[in-house]
Image: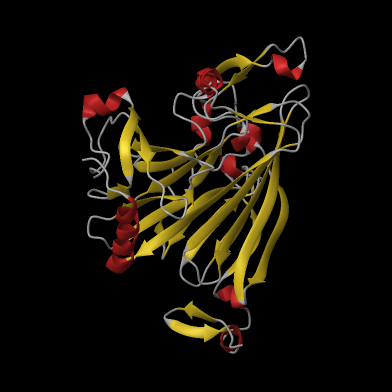
């Protein structure tokens, strides 16, 4: 069997050929552990991952194993809000009417969950059989963001003859007389890859039926979001739009330049899954020179929100696969769509984030989506 070849700075090289040219392949691509050590980020463990294709990625170990800064060819892909990757010890879960999560919103991926996502409020907790705790208060997108992970693996592994960078960790969300849920997250990127693959498993370690909600807040910033950038998806209809959509009238399909005082717009799109069971969406530059495509298993996260934060200094689009409708926790309990995990029961999620380079790749992504369906104007 011939050696696997990797794309390295315009050349096709096997690992032996690459090793003849460098004393350490980490000069080309690698994964390493660091600790952030200044300002609000001080003490946050992270993994830095680089591929020979020019993808750079931070995995925030102490921030629920979410994705921090991301760049391709030096250009930022993941949005930076200005908050920084705050140490979880600084998080104020219940402050600001439950909206303090917004002070932790930064980076390519911020995950909502594990027992709650979307907007907060008081919900019944009687099933935990602790009389002083008849209800529980949730803030925006839950508690997961401020929980450090337990790192299980950060290594270069060989899969089907090719080198893959793999990072794996578990995050436990637990309280006495309440939920005891575990997220086990595996992140993989090929040695010469431009695709980030996420595999998440959430299981109930507790012995009471426990609610489970899950959401990915995938945040794409400039220059992948810019004037004329197009949102492409197979959309059958819009299930919900925020009031700001009617007031401002900014298109969900084609983005404007930053707008002073812009009020966030949120769309819940009903997506059409492909024959392979995947939902796909993409952001494609006006000149088709670059883009990003996100795909995920539709059965696990059947719902999807497009978040437009197009104001000056905050310019970003959020691509948000979700287990539940935008109405959130209490509505899911009322209409029977809430997921209740029994002891030992689990749910599984697979998602990929792929950087698109050049008109051929952005065109191919558009064609993949259009084969599944069109979208309203």
Q: Nearer the viewer, residue 319 or 273?
A: 273
Q: Residue at x 60, y 26 (%)?
A: 92
Q: Position of residue 297 (x, y in %)?
A: 51, 48
Q: Residue at x 27, y 55 (%)?
A: 285
- Quarter of the picture containing the N terminus is bottom right
Q: In the shown orientation, is residue 136 left or right of residue 96?
A: right
Q: Residue at x 22, y 28 (%)?
A: 248
Q: Is residue 361 above or below residue 330?
A: below
Q: Nearer the viewer, residue 315 or 195?
A: 195
Q: Residue furthest front?
A: 275
Q: In the shown orientation, is residue 259 left or right of residue 215?
A: left
Residue 341 visible (yes or no) = yes
Q: Position of residue 43 (x, y in %)?
A: 66, 45
- Quarter of the picture containing the C terminus is top left
* Residue 111: quarter of image: top right
Q: How many marks?
A: 0
* Residue 85: quarter of image: top right
Q: In the shown orientation, is residue 270 left or right of residue 188?
A: left
| Colour approach in the figure | secondary structure
Q: Position of residue 41 (x, y in %)?
A: 59, 43
Q: Residue at x 34, y 37 (%)?
A: 308
Q: Position of residue 318 (x, y in %)?
A: 40, 41
Residue 82 visible (yes or no) = no
Q: Is residue 261 above or below residue 55?
A: above
């Amino acid at each position: 069997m011939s050696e696997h070849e990797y794309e390295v700075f315009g050349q096709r090289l096997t690992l032996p050929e690459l090793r003849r040219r460098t004393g350490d392949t980490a000069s080309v691509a690698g994964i390493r552990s660091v600790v952030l050590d200044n300002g609000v980020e001080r003490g946050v463990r992270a993994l830095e991952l680089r591929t020979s294709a020019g993808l750079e990625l931070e995995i925030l170990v102490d921030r629920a194993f979410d994705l921090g800064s991301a760049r391709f060819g030096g250009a930022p892909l993941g949005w930076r809000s200005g908050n920084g990757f705050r140490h979880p010890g600084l998080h104020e879960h219940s402050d600001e009417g439950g909206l303090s999560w917004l002070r932790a919103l930064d980076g390519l991926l911020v995950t909502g969950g594990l027992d709650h996502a979307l907007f907060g409020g008081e919900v019944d907790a009687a099933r935990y059989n602790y009389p002083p705790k008849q209800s529980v208060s949730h803030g925006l997108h839950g508690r997961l963001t401020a929980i450090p992970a337990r790192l299980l693996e950060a290594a270069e592994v060989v899969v089907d003859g090719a080198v893959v960078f793999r990072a794996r960790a578990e995050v436990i969300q637990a309280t006495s007389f309440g939920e005891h849920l575990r997220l086990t997250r595996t992140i993989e990127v090929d040695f010469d890859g431009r695709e980030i693959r996420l595999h998440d498993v959430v299981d109930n370690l507790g012995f009471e039926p426990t609610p489970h909600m899950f959401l990915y807040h995938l945040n794409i910033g400039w220059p992948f979001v810019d004037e004329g950038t197009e949102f492409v998806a197979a959309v059958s209809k819009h299930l919900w739009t925020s009031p700001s959509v009617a007031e401002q009238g900014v298109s969900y399909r084609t983005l404007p330049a930053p707008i002073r005082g812009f009020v966030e717009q949120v769309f819940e799109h009903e997506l059409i899954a492909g024959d392979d069971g995947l939902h796909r969406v993409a952001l494609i530059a006006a000149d088709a020179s670059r883009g990003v495509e996100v795909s995920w298993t539709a059965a696990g996260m059947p719902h999807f929100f497009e978040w437009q934060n197009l104001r000056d200094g905050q310019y970003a689009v959020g691509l948000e696969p979700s287990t539940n409708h935008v109405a959130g926790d209490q509505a899911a309990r009322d209409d029977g769509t809430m997921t209740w995990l029994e002891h030992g029961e689990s749910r599984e999620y697979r998602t990929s984030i792929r950087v698109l380079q050049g008109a051929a790749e952005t065109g191919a992504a558009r064609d993949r989506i259009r084969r599944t369906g069109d979208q309203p104007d």
